[in-house]
Amino acid sequence: MTYSAASFSPESNLPPRQRNSLRRLSFWPLVIATFFMVSGGAYGTEDIVRGAGYLRGIVILLLTPLLWSVPTALMMGELSSAIPAEGGYYAWVRRAMGDFWGFQEAWLSLGASIFDMAIYPTLFVAYLTRMVPALSLRHRGVMLGVALVALCALLNIAGIRVVATTSVGMFLLLSAPFALIVLLAPFKHGALASGALVHSAPGGVPVGMVGGLLVAMWNYMGWDNASTIAAEVDEPQRTYPRAILTAVVIVALSYILPVAAMSLTGISPNAWETGSWADLAGLVGGPGLRLAVVLGGMISAFGMFNCLVLSYSRLPLAMAQDGLLPSIFARVHPRTQAPWVAILVCATTWALCLGLGFERLVTIDILVYGSSLLLEFIALVVLRITQPDLPRPFRVPGGILGVVALGVAPTVLLGFSVIRSEHEQILGMSSFSVGLLLMAAGVAAYGIRAAWRQLRPTEGATPDAQG
């Protein structure tokens, strides 16, 4: 069985001129899109400082990308340059290990997205209620989250150009307040040692050292998400490795510099909690900077959700084109080529998970996502062994031992998520149990799909499913 990048592309049957016009993500737009798929700025790092303190928090923020992000980025650089296919990591695992494991990779990634994508509307509402506390009452926060999900779904149906253009603008807007914090905080050296935040987020609780590490892992995870749009990127073999490594540096700096600057002010780590960047900025630069950070937090959450819709929606599309999902998921918009059915189904599922607590979402998200990430590292090794002649414009150094060693540190860090998942409860079960159920459901879903294909042997991939 052979696979090609074209077989995964929603525009593979379009005329060449029209197909080329749709590929608009060049180097910097891909860097910004990756930034939002992974980070969205320093928002979400508050619990790291609260759980670990400044010094250990900064160490965590320095070491996590080296042990967690860089190995993932290198793995993705090799596989995305060798197999620049729509569906990204799903296509890699499927090529390396066949339909079953390809299905499980996509299932785990989409399962993780259920919890991952509920986090961003939660953060959006957390910052919005800093300006208008009344919006947190009753079910207003959930309603606002649903509205954000619906708006991002519409933007994605409008096409990849719209998502890329809005992402660049949002990156500049959310980065500006933190640049001011980095510049102004040193002038408050030691001045805020007795300062207290003017607002405390409802439900804020200490997360501890392990919890801080898990939040750091969450803040640095998702590099492979950018791979699913490979068929819509210019010169993906050359662009991906450079763009991902550039994004790693930008993301790390966006976390470390503001936290390091705030450590100079002397404010207690206990004052930090989810959403507290707004009040911290107010203490450093006054009401104007506080408002800018609040608006930036909303922009960050919106931008992350928007770009991740772009990423996750390509999985059902690619699977449907391969006959692993019903052909309806292969339907694309006739003008924008956006997989509108996949977008709407995914958005509806994400909206149903709104309202869960931030830390519970992070714990289960890392556990399920980590399982899919391990499959990607295994696919890297398997492809090196079984397809040594596969053209690899970018190659992880060190031969087979090098690619095996690459996955060691991420695997060890994932052990922390397993430990933590046994103590977090979702629907009366531990997060670990929920994760195992999701994995078992993936095996069952593949079995059901196989039985259905035996009953309907003529049903297969849909090469052209527009409308």
Image (cartoon, helix red, strand yellow):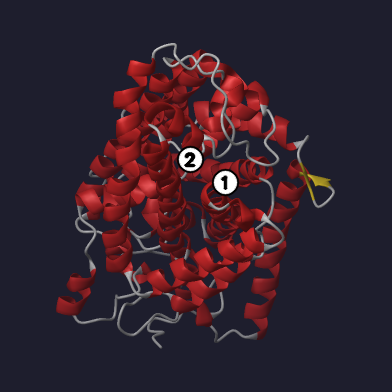
- Residue 395 visible, this orientation: no
What residue is shown with label 1?
A: 369
**Residue 265: horizontal and vertical position, in percent?**
44, 16
Left or right: where does residue 433 sit relative to residue 86?
right
- Quadrant where the C terminus lies? bottom left
Tell me the SS state at disc 1: helix
Q: Find the distance from the CA under tag 2 to the CA under tag 1.
A: 9 Å
Which quarter of the image is occupied by the N terminus? bottom left
Up/down of 432 relative to 198, above or below: below
Tell me the kind of residue under disc 2: Met
Q: Nearer the viewer, residue 289 or 466?
A: 289
Q: Is residue 269 above or below residue 85?
A: above
Q: Quadrant of residue 395?
A: top left
Q: Is residue 44 visible?
A: yes
Position of 390 compared to 139: left or right? left
Residue 63: give its label.
none
